[in-house]
Each structure stands twice: as structure tokens, then as C-alpha cells.
Image: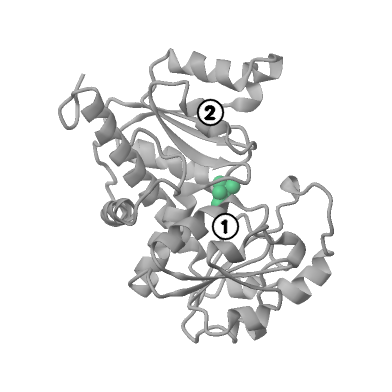
Amino acid sequence: ARHLLGIEPLSPSDITSILDLADSYVALNRRTIKRADALAGMTQINMFFENSTRTQASFELAGMRLGADVMNMSMAQSSLKKGETLIDTALTLNAMRPDLLVVRHPQSGAVNLLAEKVNCAVLNAGDGRHEHPTQALLDALTIRRAKGRLHRLTVAICGDIAHSRVARSNLLLLGKMESRLRLIGPATLMPAGAAELGCEVYEDMREGLQGADVVMMLRLQRERMDGGFIPSEREYYHRWGLNADKLACAAPDAIVMHPGPMNRGVEIDGTIADDINRSVIQDQVEMGVAVRMAAMDLLARNLRAERGLAAAGGQ
Ligand code: CP
């Protein structure tokens, strides 16, 4: 494929190939000298129209470690503020001949639209409520390394599922890899048709966590909420916040995940988040760099093949 816009079009073997390559990049990233040349001579532009800490930093590091020339567009200072459209901005950057565009946008579908207009590879770094494919891939790599497999694991995703592109991409990926999926949260934050996705749906957290191997917590995404009942943070924490008492319902060796940014004392107790025996939150961040290296490496190979170039270093 030319682009990585979502998990939806990927097959289980595509997912396994990305994770296998990412595993090799985890090893590289643990060395003192973190250098490979898969993107040598290529230009990567990061365009983030929404705030990011983890995704932007890890895409930037991933590109640099693979030898790309990496530019972070400062979208707040761009001519979008003067009325230029997303498409005109993309066409302008496309004329500068980048090879990889990494795009985050608040509107679902905006990244797919942009991908139709440019000649380079586009990676979706999160679009509205739609998809966040590299997050799901890094989550899968984290789970696979902790549990040794993805199939026949019970994965409980808890919190604001309705507004979450992370949940959507994870449901698609984990479903393809034959994990057993449970969704836990207030009915008002559950997407329509959740049960049809093959998930078990629970409002009671203790019930939903029974025997779970993986507990994935999500924050309340207030920036995407348009009215509707939202419980107070205090009430939310009481019913759906993860603490030691509720975690005791999961399997004794269950891992705790959170994509970040995390709101301690709202969806998760800080002591659980920091418990290195249960929490893999920092592993997720580490896997993020490796997965983004793997994704860009594979897209760069496809670009070279499309352009009829030899493996690395073609004109
Ligand atoms: N998980 C995630 O997408 O985090 P950022 O918003 O910090 O990139």
C-alpha cells in the first residue's frame, strides 16, 4: 500500500509483518548508537493540526533514527490562519517533494482526503474519532511482548469509547487478531452498534474486568463531546476509574495500559499507573517509536518499488 490511513484495510499478516519489523527496531533503539538508513535521503514532513506529545515526538525520532530529513510544520504559524484550506496547504507541501507526510487532524476523514491529493506516502497520526492506526499497532506490540500472543486474550477497553479513535483502531486490530473484546463504560460514552462489532459491553466495571488479561484505560475526550450527559469527574472516578480494588477483578497477571495523555484520579489511580509490576504505559511509549519506524520503513520500500528504485539510496 502507498499509505497507512487506518487499521481497517490491513490483513492479519500485514499487522504481523509490521510488528515483527518493529521488534527489530526495539532492539536497535536500545543500543547506544540508534542509526539505520531505511529513510536515508527521504524527506518526512509532520503536520499536526491537533496537540500531541507522544505521537509527534515519536514520529520525529523515528524519522531521524532512520536517516530521513524531518521537518515539523508549525501549523499554528502556517497560512491556514490566513484562510488557506487543508488541501491547498497539502498541495503546497506536496510541490516541495516530500516522501512521507505524517498528519494529525481533528476532523474524521481529513487525512484520507489529503492522501488523495499528494504523490507521497501519508501516515494517519489520528483523525477525529476515526482512526489512530500507529497507536493500535504500538498497543498490539506492547501486548504481544508482555503476553507472547494476541489471539485468545481477553482485552477490556474502559472509558470513553464513543469519542475514541484509539478504541476504534484497537477494536479493528484486536478483532482481526482474534482477541476477545470487552467494552466497559457509561452507556452515554458507548458507540452505537458496539455489540455488533463482536464486543461484550458492560456498564459495571467490576463485572467487565472479571478475568481480563489486558486492561486498557481511556481518558474522557471532552474536546470531542457535543452535549449529552457526562458524569462529574468525581462520580466518574468512583464508577469507572481504575483502582487496586477494581483491578483485583482482572486476571492476577493482567497488564494495565493507557495511550496517554492520562488524567490521574479521573480514569486511573496514579499508584496503578506507576506500578511497574502491572502498568506497561511507559512500554507503550517505547514501542511507539519502534512501530513508527517500522511503518515508515515499509511505506518507503513500497515508494521505492513504485518509483522503480533499488532498495535504499535510489535517486
Ligand atoms: N496517544 C497519543 O496519541 O498521545 P498524544 O496525543 O500525546 O500524541
Give the residue drawn at x 58%, y 32%. Answer: 110
Which of the colour schemes (rainbow, by chain, secondary structure, one colour) is used?
one colour
Which labelled disc corresponds to residue 63? none
Residue for badge 1 = 167
Q: Is mark 1 within 8 Å of ligand 1?
A: no
State how far apart marks 1 and 2 are (Cα): 22 Å
Question: Which one is earlier in the sequence, the residue at label 1 or at label 2?
Answer: 2
Disc 1: CA contacts within 10 A as few (<14), some (14-19) or many (>=20): many
Residue for badge 2 = 113
Q: Is residue 230 visible?
A: yes
Image x and y of residue 216, in percent = 56, 67
On the image, which quarter does residue 26 sit in? bottom left
Q: Secondary structure at mark 2?
A: helix
| Quadrant of the rendering where the C terminus is positioned | top left
Image x and y of residue 245, in percent = 66, 85
Disc 2: CA contacts within 10 A as few (<14), some (14-19) or many (>=20): few
The answer to whether residue 104 is above or below residue 248 is above
